């Protein structure tokens, strides 16, 4: 097993978690899936993929997609496990901050939902640090249209987010 | 010449437009005020989108050691499903019917897989985690981490052999500073804890995965730079005698129980002399960095402290330095790069108890707004190992100099004929006493 994977693991694990988080919206699940993605990639017979990072994110995206379909029963089970394993009490939460974070999260979630699948995927991959080439490889977009896709995705995200905030403000 | 379409404007901003296309676009931009305005608009959208995305970052425990993941991977017997489904990337362009059929197959496989998982470590993939619970909980992480063969840690033998708990108090704080890897950096930070009573934390070890491999270079090649300021009040009496420059923390959340002291060590010979164990403990260079084409480290600083059982060892350390570098270079405004503009921006980052950057502030501008923006964007991706004080995670501020020069390229190590990385310029920055900005 080449050391490159160790470097890749350390350099992009957090990005992978963030990428997955925007798909499953559960931080612990996201981390679980990120670990699982690495385990799968590392245990695969393919040792030298052309683009390790793109491959990794592909595996992760597939896991997240499976997760979305098979998730419910599993989550329930994990919740059980979690409560059993709660040796350490959670750090004292700050209610105000948590609320604020929750709002931000919900806003992003909704805004992302307003994007087309392909646009969202490209944007999340970009946000996770992949470059145009890797994004093209993973999404099947032509290299030349990654920019257009990202441009549209960003614009829609900003618009959807602004619309949500306006709606939110009106409610208050 | 036609106007530049929006996609190319974004590609230009993303640094993805290269060669003739980039040159043509820039030439056009010089002449066309319309396109310049659209470029500004695209940049605004891009920044807003980044900000929105950065708004919701997952809060997770630190990842387990790579060795643990590797062990899990090796434990995976050839799965009945065959190789991982890596070979089936999501192709949005695939015909609908195919996609539908594929999704059915995937759903079935996924369901089966999930089912297997819920029943226990049948496939062995999760054998490390299954008996105790999800990986993410510190308690369960501690076990495999401690047991996993971690070659990189053998040099920590002394520290690990120290009796747990109270016995560890006797160990000099410096014993924790083994495995110091100094990136080929222009600078080095050290955030050191006072020799406060050390307690062994189950969670401490996994909290900071060994980042020591970032790049290992003799420690002498560095100069100090980043200052970590404890959020909690620094107590002088608790500071190690040899602490040298002590940057007093400010007590915004000064519970007496958490005196995280922060201390800056000036690097160069100063630091190495001060920290005796350091030179001998320097880890062997990772093979990846053996190529010699070490990219210049654009993020100032940092002494990587191998996690040990001493809580202070969990000093603020970016976990994804490599990634941060990539992002930085990618964010390097092409226009600035080509006109030879570079500079160093000084950032103050508030790192929260999860290790995420909660707030980023521009402390000293590089004098070039575009470069400052690029530097600020890196805060979006930086992840630190949470600083620990006893069993408390503590937020802290770090001061990070970020420098960009026209010679910085995305991945010099990848291409043999890439320009040699600029020689590290040792810099000595005054070790100020930063007060977290209000």
Image (cartoon, coloured by chain):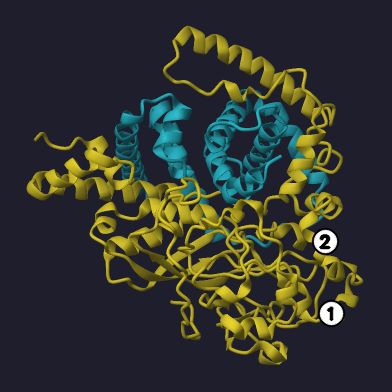
Chain colours: A cyan, B yellow
Query: Is B370 drawn above or below residue A140 in the view shown?
Result: below
Q: Which mark is residue B171?
A: 1
Q: Residues within 10 Å of mark 1 (few under 14, many from 20)?
A: some
Please report the residue visible at 57 percent of the width from the left and 47 percent of the height from the top: A12
Residue B264 in view in this figure: no
Q: Residues within 10 Å of mark 2 (few under 14, many from 20)?
A: few
* Left or right for A156, reference B354: left
Q: Are marks 1 and 2 on the same chain?
A: yes
Tag in front: 1 or 2: 2
- Give the secondary structure at mark 1: loop
* Left or right for B340, reference B350: left
Q: Nearer the viewer, residue A160 or A170?
A: A160
Query: Is B102 drawn above or below residue A143 in the view shown?
Result: above
- Give the secondary structure at mark 2: helix
Q: Chain of mark 1?
A: B
Q: Which mark is residue B154?
A: 2
Q: Nearer the viewer, residue A130 or B60?
A: A130
Q: Position of residue B379 (x, y in %)?
A: 46, 60
Q: Position of residue A64 (x, y in %)?
A: 59, 31
Q: CA distance from mark 1 to mark 2?
A: 18 Å
Q: Nearer the viewer, residue B58 or B266?
A: B266
Please report the residue visible at 83 percent of the width from the left and 27 percent of the height from the top: B119
For the C terminus of chain B, the image quarter is: bottom left
Please report the residue visible at 78 percent of the width from the left and 71 percent of the height from the top: B310
Say which label, 1 or 2, has the lower sequence index. Answer: 2
């Amino acid at each position: 097993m080449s050391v490159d994977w160790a470097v890749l693991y350390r350099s992009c694990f957090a990005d992978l978690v963030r990428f997955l988080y925007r798909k499953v919206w559960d931080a612990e699940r996201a981390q679980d899936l990120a670990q699982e993605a690495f385990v799968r990639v590392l245990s695969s017979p393919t040792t030298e993929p052309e683009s390790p990072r793109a491959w990794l994110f592909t595996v992760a995206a597939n896991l997240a997609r499976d997760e979305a379909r098979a998730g419910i029963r599993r989550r329930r089970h994990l919740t059980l496990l979690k409560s059993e394993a709660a040796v350490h009490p959670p750090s004292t939460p700050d209610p105000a901050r948590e609320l604020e974070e929750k709002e931000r999260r919900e806003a992003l979630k909704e805004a992302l939902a307003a994007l087309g699948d392909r646009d969202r995927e490209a944007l999340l991959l970009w946000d996770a640090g992949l470059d145009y080439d890797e994004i093209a490889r993973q999404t099947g977009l032509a290299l030349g249209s990654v920019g257009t896709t990202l441009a549209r995705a960003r614009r829609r995200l900003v618009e959807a987010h602004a619309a949500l905030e306006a709606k939110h403000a009106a409610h208050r | 010449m036609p106007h530049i379409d929006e996609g190319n404007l974004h590609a230009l901003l993303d640094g993805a437009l290269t060669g003739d296309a980039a040159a043509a676009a820039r030439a056009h931009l010089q002449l066309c005020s319309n396109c310049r305005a659209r470029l500004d608009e695209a940049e605004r959208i891009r920044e807003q989108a980044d900000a929105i995305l950065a708004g919701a970052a997952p809060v997770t425990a630190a990842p387990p050691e790579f060795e643990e993941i590797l062990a899990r991977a090796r434990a995976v017997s050839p799965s009945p499903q065959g190789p991982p489904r890596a070979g089936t990337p999501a192709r949005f362009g695939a015909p609908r019917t195919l996609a539908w059929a594929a999704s059915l197959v995937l759903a079935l496989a996924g369901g089966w897989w999930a089912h297997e998982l819920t029943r226990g470590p049948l496939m062995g993939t999760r054998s490390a985690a299954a008996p105790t619970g999800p990986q993410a909980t510190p308690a369960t992480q501690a076990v495999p981490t401690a047991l996993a063969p971690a070659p990189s840690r053998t040099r920590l033998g002394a520290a690990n052999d120290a009796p747990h708990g109270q016995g560890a108090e006797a160990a000099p704080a410096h014993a924790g500073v083994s495995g110091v890897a100094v990136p080929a950096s222009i600078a080095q930070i050290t955030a050191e804890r006072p020799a406060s009573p050390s307690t062994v934390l189950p969670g401490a070890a996994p909290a900071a995965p060994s980042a020591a491999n970032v790049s290992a270079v003799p420690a002498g090649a560095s100069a100090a730079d980043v200052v970590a300021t404890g959020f909690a009040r620094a107590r002088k009496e608790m500071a190690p005698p040899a602490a040298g420059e002590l940057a007093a923390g400010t007590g915004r959340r000064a519970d007496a129980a958490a005196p995280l002291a922060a201390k800056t060590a000036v690097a160069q010979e100063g630091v190495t002399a001060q920290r005796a164990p350091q030179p001998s403990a320097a880890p062997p260079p990772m093979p990846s960095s053996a190529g010699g084409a070490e990219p210049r480290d654009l993020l100032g600083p940092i002494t990587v402290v191998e996690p040990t059982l001493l809580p202070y060892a969990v000093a603020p350390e970016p976990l994804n330095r490599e990634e941060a570098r990539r992002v930085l270079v990618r964010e390097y405004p092409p226009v600035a790069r080509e006109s030879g503009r570079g500079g160093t921006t000084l950032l103050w980052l508030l790192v929260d108890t999860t290790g995420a950057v909660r707030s980023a502030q521009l402390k000293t501008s590089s004098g070039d707004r575009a470069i400052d923006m690029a530097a600020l964007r890196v805060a979006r991706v930086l992840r630190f190992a949470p600083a620990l004080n006893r069993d408390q995670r503590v937020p802290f501020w770090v001061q990070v100099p970020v420098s960009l020069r026209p010679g910085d390229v995305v991945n010099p190590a990848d291409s043999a004929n890439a320009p040699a990385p600029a020689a590290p310029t040792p810099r000595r920055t005054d070790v100020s006493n930063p007060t977290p900005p209000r």
